[in-house]
Amino acid sequence: MKTATIRDLRNHFAELSNWIENGETIQLTKRGVAYAQIRPVKPLKDKFKFPNFSLRAKGIAKGTVIDLDGILKLNQGRF
């Protein structure tokens, strides 16, 4: 658990927000006394990583450029 002051929350909110996004619980203090806790609502799953569509297309096409007719040929029988 990380600790921050109310002033830190006001002046460095982006940094504290990153802590929360990474699953950390933050204990806020006011005049040196524990005041509140901020924690993520639910555990975060791994962030979704988009596939690299251009590499996937190159793999399908074996490095060649595909025109519209080529795409239609690739999609035949899929629908």
Image: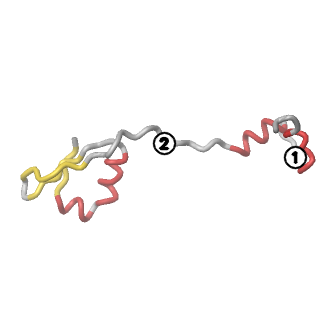
Number of numbered discs: 2
Dot 1 or dot 2: first in sequence order is: 2
Furthest residue in direction front, as rendered: 79
Residue tagged by mark 1?
A: 66
Residue at 33 percent across and 54 percent down: it is 17
Residue nearest the viewer, comparing 36 with 5? 36
Q: Is residue 79 above or below residue 9?
A: above
Residue type, mark 1 in image: Ile
* Circle 1 crowding by C-alpha within 10 Å: few under 14, some 14–19, many from 20: some
Cα separation between marks 1 and 2: 32 Å
**Is 22 on the left-hand or right-hand side of 46?**
left
Residue at 40 percent across and 40 percent down: it is 44
Residue type, mark 2 in image: Lys
Residue at 79 percent across and 40 percent down: it is 58
**Horizontal and vertical percent for residue 24?**
29, 43
**Is 54 on the left-hand or right-hand side of 17?**
right
Q: Quadrant of the N terminus?
A: top left
